[in-house]
Amino acid sequence: MPESPEVQALVEFLDERIRSRAIADLDVGEFRIIKTRDRPPASLVGARIRRLERFGKHVGFDTDAGWLMIGFGRNGWIRWHAPEDPPSEEPVPEVARIALDDGAVMQLVDMGDFLAVTANVVDAPADVSGIAALGPDPLAQDFDRDAFDRALGTRRKQIKALLQEQTSIAGIGNAYSDEILHRAKISPVVHAALLDGEERERLFHATVDVLRGALSDRRGLRPDQLKQAKVAAMAVHGRGGEACPVCGTTIVDRVFGGASAQLCPHCQPERSAA
């Protein structure tokens, strides 16, 4: 699942290359992705791109004819083809293609078994309900401890699930929630209401440090390199059966409430969620 560090790195990479370019063609191969049927993406052909922005795990193309808002879902992504790149013959599950006036092409793909990519053409990003409901973003400069505490509240909800709840905190998915909780030395099943002040402090700094550190590491990479770099950098996520890089204890897989997690039982001892 694309998460905020990689999506932000993608946005910065593309923004440098597409800003002020005009959309020469916008072909949608899978019409189920379109959520604004009265305003299809093809209505943006000829529009000039003013900038590209990230909203949580979504991407917004600001054009002089409106915003094209892309939701990646679980397995969506954008593949970049510069004008000088040789044609690619690799078959990919392309759902849409954006061609620019300089010959560059962006392929919107969905690698999942179930289509989850979305496309909306709107006047403002907040016109998309999922964008309007986003919580505070840890990559934003104004994200502070007060914003974090308000997002957590005192809810009796498992902390891993709360970290992934986009209306509480924007941009975190399954992988980075595992990494953050490992860094903070907190079990994924403990309820937010049971965290004491010192644990909340650790969790706040872990959230900021993990996400901003990941973004710093990903900046400048091509879009097709970002997923591999993310996987390689994981300390516990996806590493069940391997040794914890902190203490050497075997990392374990846990399934609870329909969700999965990888954690170190020594660094993140479980306790009652009651």
Image (cartoon, rainbow, N blue to C red):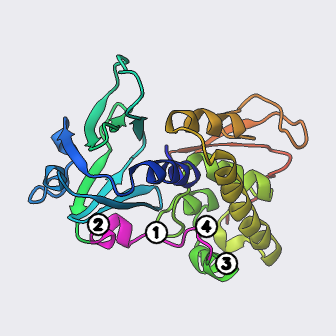
Q: Earlier in the sequence, mark 2 or mark 1?
A: 2
What is the crowding at mark 1: few (fewer than 14 residues within 10 Å), some, or many (at least 20)?
some
Q: Position of 164 compared to 60: left or right?
A: right
Dot 1 or dot 3: first in sequence order is 3
Residue 188 visible (yes or no) = no
Position in image of residue 229 (x %, y %): 64, 36
Residue that label 4 marks:
138
Tags 2 and 3 in contact by the CB under 8 Å rule? Answer: no
Q: Which residue is mark 2?
A: 128
Discs 1/3, front: 3
Residue indicated by mark 3: 144
Which residue is painted at 61% across and 79% down in the image?
A: 147
Q: Nearer the viewer, mark 2 or mark 1?
A: 2
Question: Could you give the CA–CA distance between mark 2 and mark 3, rounded to whole angstroms?
Answer: 26 Å
What residue is pinned by disc 1? 167
Q: Which residues are magenta?
A: 124-141
* Element class at badge 1: loop
Q: Amino acid at mark 1?
A: Thr
For the residues bearing labels 4 and 3, Cβ distance under 8 angstroms: no
**Res. 4 image quadrant:** bottom right
- Distance from label 1 to label 4 (Cα)? 13 Å
Amino acid residing under circle 2: Val
Q: Which badge, 4 or 3, is on the more N-terminal residue?
A: 4
Total tally of numbered discs in the picture? 4
